[in-house]
Image: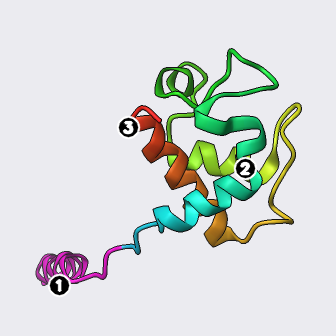
Amino acid sequence: MRLFFNAIAALITAISLLWATPAVAADLAQGAQVFSTNCAACHAGGRNVVNAAKTLQKSDLEKYDMASLEAIKYQVQNGKNAMPAFSGRLTAEQIENVAAYVLDQAENGW
């Protein structure tokens, strides 16, 4: 009997996952605006004026384990070395959007 209830619970869980609302996609246009306002001074065109070896190009993001949305969001929120932290200046949504924009641009060659 217990096996039957476990199977029913698993089935209900599976069905609910199929009907779950997908996560809202990032707004790349808003990410571009945030990038233009806050990031372009140092990273225009995916470059890096402070450290030319660490660009926002896909190959460099991969080389430095930054080629994921989570890694980019963390960097924007917390900063590192010469890059300031933006957690107090940008909302979580803006950080999500700019990270998605950077990743999208890197994927498409800036």
Identify the secondary structure beneath mark 1.
Answer: helix
Please rate how many residues cluster around mark 2, counting C-alpha atoms within 10 Å: few if below 14, some from 14 to 19, many from 20: many
- Say whether residue 4 is left or right of residue 46: left
In the image, residue 37 above or below residue 75: below
Comparing marks 2 and 1, which lies closer to the viewer? 2
Q: Identity of the amino acid at label 2?
A: Val
Distance from label 3 to label 2 (Cα)? 20 Å
Q: Read off the residue under disc 3.
A: 108
Give the residue drawn at x 40%, y 68%.
25
Q: Read off the residue under disc 2.
A: 76
Query: Which numbered disc flags the more N-terminal residue, 3 or 2?
Result: 2
Give the residue drawn at x 47%, y 61%.
28
Please rate how many residues cluster around mark 1, counting C-alpha atoms within 10 Å: few if below 14, some from 14 to 19, many from 20: few
Q: Which residues are magenta?
A: 1-22
Q: Identity of the amino acid at label 1?
A: Phe
Residue 104 coordinates in the image, percent (x, y) = 43, 46
Residue 5 coordinates in the image, percent (x, y) = 17, 84
Give the residue drawn at x 80%, y 49%.
78
- Say whether residue 11 is left or right of residue 53: left
Q: Nearer the viewer, residue 74 or 98?
A: 98
Residue 45 coordinates in the image, percent (x, y) = 58, 35
Q: Nearer the viewer, residue 49 or 21?
A: 49
The quarter of the rendered structure image containing the N terminus is bottom left
Distance from label 1 to label 3 (Cα)? 49 Å
Q: Read off the residue under disc 1.
A: 5
Identify the secondary structure beneath mark 2.
Answer: helix
Query: Which numbered disc flags the more N-terminal residue, 2 or 1?
Result: 1
- Say whether residue 76 is left or right of residue 80: left
